[in-house]
Image (tube, helix red, strand yellow):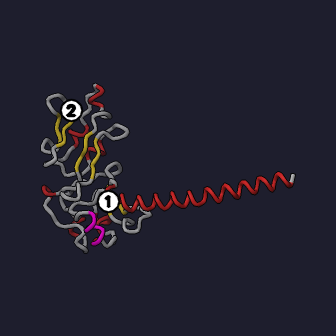
Amino acid sequence: MSDQTGRRGFFKEALNQIIQPVAEFLDDQIGERILIDAPDRVILRPPGALPEPEFLEKCHRCGNCVKNCPANAIQPLQSQVPNLANTPYIAPDEQPCVICDSLACMYVCPSGALQIVYAEDIRIGLAVFNAETCLRTKEVACTYCVDTCPIGEEAIRLTPEGIVEVIDSGCTGCGVCQYACPTVPKSIVVKPLPLSS
C-alpha cells in the first residue's frame, strides 16, 4: 500500500515537473501576445483620440472623459496590461457613442490625448458588415442598423439588392448600428481605424 502511494506520489511529482514549465511558458507567451497584439485588439477610443501609440503615451488615465460623458458610453478599460489599464474606451454592445452636442470628453481631457474636432470630422472607427450572419441574407427584412444610424445614408444604406453597405467616408464609428443589431454574433461591428488613417 505504502509502495503504491509512493509510486503515485513519484509520478504525480514527475508530471508536475513536466507540466509546470509548460504552463509557465504558455503564460509568458499569452502575456506577451496580449502586449504585442494590444493595439490591434478591438479597443475603440473616445472621439478625438490620437492614434493609439500617441494616445497611450499622453493619456493620464484621469477619468475626466468617463465622468463627463453624458451618454455613459466611455468606460475605464479593465486590463492586465499596464499601459492599457484604466484607459478610456467605448464598448458599443453596452453603450455606443451618440456624438453628443457638447462633445464634453474632448474638452475635459487635460493631456491632449483627446483632440478637439468638429462633430462631422469624428472618426472613432469604421463599421464592418458581415453578410454571413445578417438577417437580411436569411430573408428577414431587418433594417435596424440602417434605421438607427445617426448619420443616415451618408454612412450606411441598403444597396439596390437589399444588402447593407457601409460608406467609409461617412461612418463615424459611433457604434449605434452595432448596438442595434439583433444578431449574435453581431453582423455589423465597429473596428478601430488603421494606424495610418
Front in this rendered view, residue 24 or 102: 24
Front in this rendered view, residue 183 or 150: 183
**Crowd around label 2: few <14 · some 14–19 · many ≥20 (10 Å):** some
The image position of residue 40, as x and y in percent, is 32, 56
Q: Residue sitting at 45 percent across and 61 percent down?
A: 31
The secondary structure type at the circle numbered 1 is helix
137 displayed left or right of 170: right
Residue holding disc 1: 39
Q: Quadrant of residue 167?
A: top left
The image position of residue 155, as x and y in percent, is 16, 45
191 displayed left or right of 161: right
Q: Quadrant of residue 11?
A: bottom right
Q: Residue sitting at 86 percent across and 55 percent down?
A: 2
Residue holding disc 2: 163
Q: Residue sitting at 66 percent across and 57 percent down?
A: 16
140 displayed left or right of 196: right
Q: Quadrant of the C terminus?
A: bottom left
Q: Residue furthest top?
A: 139
In the rendered image, residue 28 lying in the magenta stretch gets the answer no
Query: In the rendered structure, which amino acid carries the disc numbered 2?
Result: Ile
State which tag comes first along the sequence, 1 or 2: 1
> Can you say whether 82 is above or below 158 in the image?
below
Majority SS type along the magenta span: helix
**Crowd around label 1: few <14 · some 14–19 · many ≥20 (10 Å):** some
Q: Residue sitting at 34 percent across and 37 percent down?
A: 183
The secondary structure type at the circle numbered 2 is loop
Whole-angstrom CA distance, mark 1 to mark 2, is 31 Å
**Which region is colored magenta?**
52-57
The image position of residue 120, as x and y in percent, is 13, 55
The image position of residue 63, as x and y in percent, is 33, 69
